[in-house]
Amino acid sequence: GAGVSQSPSNKVTEKGKDVELRCDPISGHTALYWYRQRLGQGLEFLIYFQGNSAPDKSGLPSDRFSAERTGESVSTLTIQRTQQEDSAVYLCASSRQGAQETQYFGPGTRLLVL
Amino acid sequence: RKEVEQDPGPFNVPEGATVAFNCTYSNSASQSFFWYRQDCRKEPKLLMSVYSSGNEDGRFTAQLNRASQYISLLIRDSKLSDSATYLCVVNKENRDDKIIFGKGTRLHILP
């Protein structure tokens, strides 16, 4: 079956521009996560959606970052006024119900801010 | 103490050897533990869950030590294809909806 998909796969933008990253989770998965991974670094949790509950935004690094999810389907991560330190791979993952379930990752969006 | 801590490595191990690495966690109430594998420039993928009784999957064995608050991964008869970064994952606190990824241990299998 279809896995987690993300778009775009690569994004180059200029400092100060806004970017929007998209994640399509596996159908039926209620939990959706966004992570950031800088080059050579570990995964950094950004935000977590679980069903209709209020999202856990505790990992968002600044108010320039926001994310939305439509029901239990697609999610978008928006970065406003991008900075060079935002350059990273942004990974989305979904799981059937929550953290006790396997997380399935998308291929990521590689963001480069010039 | 960090929530989840791993030796970053790299571990350089000859093909065919056995290698093991640990991951320590800070919260004694953590309930769910996993090992994920991440190949270079790829997304992480689940390697195996870690059960209280330990579990084995082919050449891979995972153990949980609650008293000392660590999990371990043992790889026997290592293959070149085992070269990757191994990520330890622990659920945060006693909630099942927060998990923490360790920064990973890099493993290089040498021919």
Image (spheres, rainbow, N blue to C red):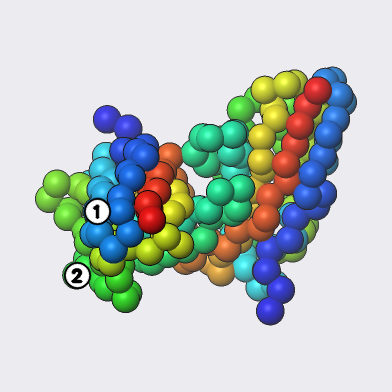
Q: Which mark is residue B53?
A: 2
Q: Secondary structure at mark 1?
A: strand
Q: CA distance from mark 1 to mark 2?
A: 18 Å
Q: Amino acid at mark 2?
A: Ser
Q: Secondary structure at mark 2?
A: loop
Q: Position of residue B83 (x, y in %)?
A: 43, 54
Q: Position of residue A82 (x, y in %)?
A: 78, 25
- Tell me: residue A25, above or below residue B13: below
Q: Which residue matches tag 1?
A: B20
Q: Amino acid at mark 1?
A: Ala
Between B76 and B14, which is closer to the camera in this rendering? B14
Q: Which residue is pictured at 14% across the width and 46% down the height?
A: B68
Q: Residues within 10 Å of mark 2 (few under 14, many from 20)?
A: few
Q: Which residue is pictured at 52% across the width and 61% down the height?
A: B45
> In which quadrant will I find the C terminus of chain B?
bottom left
Q: Is residue B4 visible?
A: no
Check the image and name the residue furthest to the bottom: A1
> In which quadrant will I find the N terminus of chain B?
top left
| Same chain shared by disc 1 and disc 2 | yes
> What count of labels does the image hold?
2
The quadrant holding residue B17 is bottom left
Q: Residues within 10 Å of mark 1 (few under 14, many from 20)?
A: few
